[in-house]
Image (cartoon, rainbow, N blue to C red):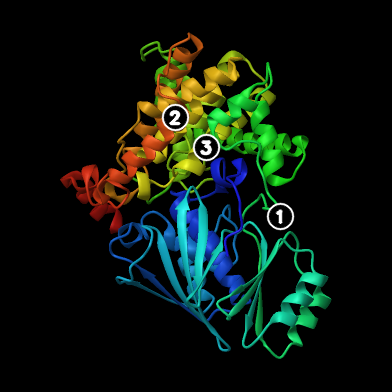
Amino acid sequence: MKVKTAPSIFNDVIGPVMRGPSSSHCAAALRIGHIARDLMGGRIDSVHVQFDPRGSLATTHTSQGSDMGLFGGLMGWEATDERLPYSAEAIADAGIEISIQIKSFNAPHPNTYMLKLINSDSEHEIVALSTGGGMIEVIAIDGVAMTMIGDYFETMVAIKGPVESLVKTIKENAENDGVFVLEGQWVEVKSQTPLDVKLIQTIKQFEQVKSIHIINPVLPVLSHKNLSVPFITSQGMIQSAKAGESLWELAVQYESRRGNITHDQVLMNMRKIVQILDKSVASGLQGTDYKDRILKQQSDSYQLAMSRSKLLDTGILNLITLYITALMEMKSSMGVIVAAPTAGSCGGLPGAVLAAAEKLGYSVEEKVKALLAGGMIGVFIAEHATFAAEVGGCQAECGAGSGMAAAALVDLMGGNVEEAVTAASLALQNTFGMTCDPVANRVEVPCLGKNVMAAANAVTCANMALAGFDAVIPLDEVIEAMHVVGMSLPAELRCTALGGLSVTDSSKRIEKKLAC
C-alpha cells in the first residue's frame, strides 16, 4: 500500500553520506541489503541474486559497487563503513552463500534487484528498485505487491485466515501511520517508532499470525501521517513566497514541514553535511590512493599549476575545479562523500558552493544556506523527473546538479527567489541529452569532466540570472521536458556501459586491465 509522501532534501537530494562509486548502485544496494537482513531477523544462510539482462545492473553490478553495497547491507554495515571494499570476503567469512544470476524476469526498472533469502527456518523473496541517488523502493515481498521506501519503521506480520480482530488490536494499541492488509498474506504496520514489545507479544498470540518481521528505516528523514508540503513546484513556491524571502528560507520551511522537524533542526542537519564536505575536500587535497581506479590523483598537479600561474585566469572556476577534483578523487578512492544529488555527481554542487564561499570569504552558515537553496531545486527534480542516470542519462545527475548549483550560487550572492529559479532553468536547459557512458564501467571518466562542466555552466547561468537574463521557459516546464528527453535516450546511453565512450577500444582495454 502506497502512503502519500514527498521528496525530502536530506533523503532524496543531498545525501546519503556514503562510500562507493555510485549512490544508485552502492548506497541503494546497501539499503536494500539492510531491509533484507531485517526481514530475515538477521539470520541469513544464502542469498540468490537475480538481475535482468536488459537493465543496468547486469553489466555494472561489480564495477559500480552494487555487490559491495548489497553485501555490506546484508552484514548490517552502514554506508560509511570503511570495510565496504572487503564486503565480499566478509560475507564469505560469515558463512553466507551468495549466487548471482543474469536472467530475464521482466524487471520493471533498470535497477531491479530480485533476492531470494534463505535460513534454516524460512525463505523469502524481495523485489526492490534503486530509484536514483541512493533512494530505493521495495515493490514486492514473497510475490505480494507493496511500497516500502525505508522512511518508516515497518512491522510485517505474515498471516493466514481472517485478520479483522488482529488489525483492530493493532490500530487500538499502536501509534501508527497506517495498517494495511496486503493480499491476505501480510499485515503491514507503518510507524514512527518501533511497536511496543508487549504489543508484539500480543500479536504473536493470534492464531492467524505465522511470523513477525520488524524492518527498520534506512532513510534519515521519516515520513508521517497526513504529510503535506507547502509547495511542490517552483511556480507554487514563488507564489507562496513572502516579500524578501530567500530560496534557502523557503527550503527550510519545506523540509521542516516535510520531516515534521523544527527550522533549527533543518539547519543543524545541513551544518553536519557541510562539515563532512569540508573534510572530504581537505582529505582529497591531502592525497588519495586506490588500486581499482582509472585516474591517478590529479588535484595535486592542478593545485601546483594554480600556484605557478600556469592556468588561464578563470577566477573562481579554478578553485571550483580543484575542489570538484578532490571530491571526485575521494569518491573513487572509497573515501566518505555526500551524494549531491548522486555519488556520480558529488562534485558539481558542493564544489561550486564551497569554493565560491571560500573565494568570497563567506562563513559556514552561508554554505549551509546555499546548499539548502540548491536542495530545494533538487526537490522539484526528484518529484517531477529523476536522479537516476539509468533512467535519464547523465542529465539526471550532473545536469540536475548543475541546475541546483546555479540556484545555490545565486542565493549565495544574495539573489532573490525568481533569479535563483531562472538560473536553475537556464542551467538545466543547457544539459539536455547528456549521456551516461562511463569508461571501463567506472564512475570516473567522463564523470570528472562532466562535474566540472556542470559547475562551470552553473556559474555562468547564475551570473546570467543575476544580470537579468530571461530563461524564457519556466523551470517546471524545463524539468518536465528534461525528463522526457532522458527517457528518450537509447538504453545504451543510460549507464549500461553499452554505448558511447564505454565501448571504445581504449575503454575496453582499460576495463580488461582493471579486471586483472
Mark 2 residue crowding within 10 angstroms, few (<14) / some (14–19) / many (20+): many
Mark 3 closeness class: few <14, some 14–19, many ≥20 residues within 10 Å: many
Q: CA distance from mark 2 to mark 3?
A: 14 Å
Q: List the single residue furthest toward the top.
A: 467
Q: Secondary structure at mark 1?
A: loop
Q: Secondary structure at mark 3?
A: helix
**Image check: 79 left or right of 346?**
right
Between residue 196 and residue 448, name the one nearer to us.
196
| Residue 225, label in figure | 1
- Give the residue pinned by disc 3: 380
Q: As displayed, is residue 331 above or below residue 45?
A: above
Which callout, 3 or 1, points to the residue nearer the camera? Answer: 1
- Which residue corresponds to mark 2? 402
- Amino acid on which the number 1 mark rests in the picture: Lys
Res 72 visible: no
Measured Cα–Cα span from mark 3 to mark 1:
22 Å
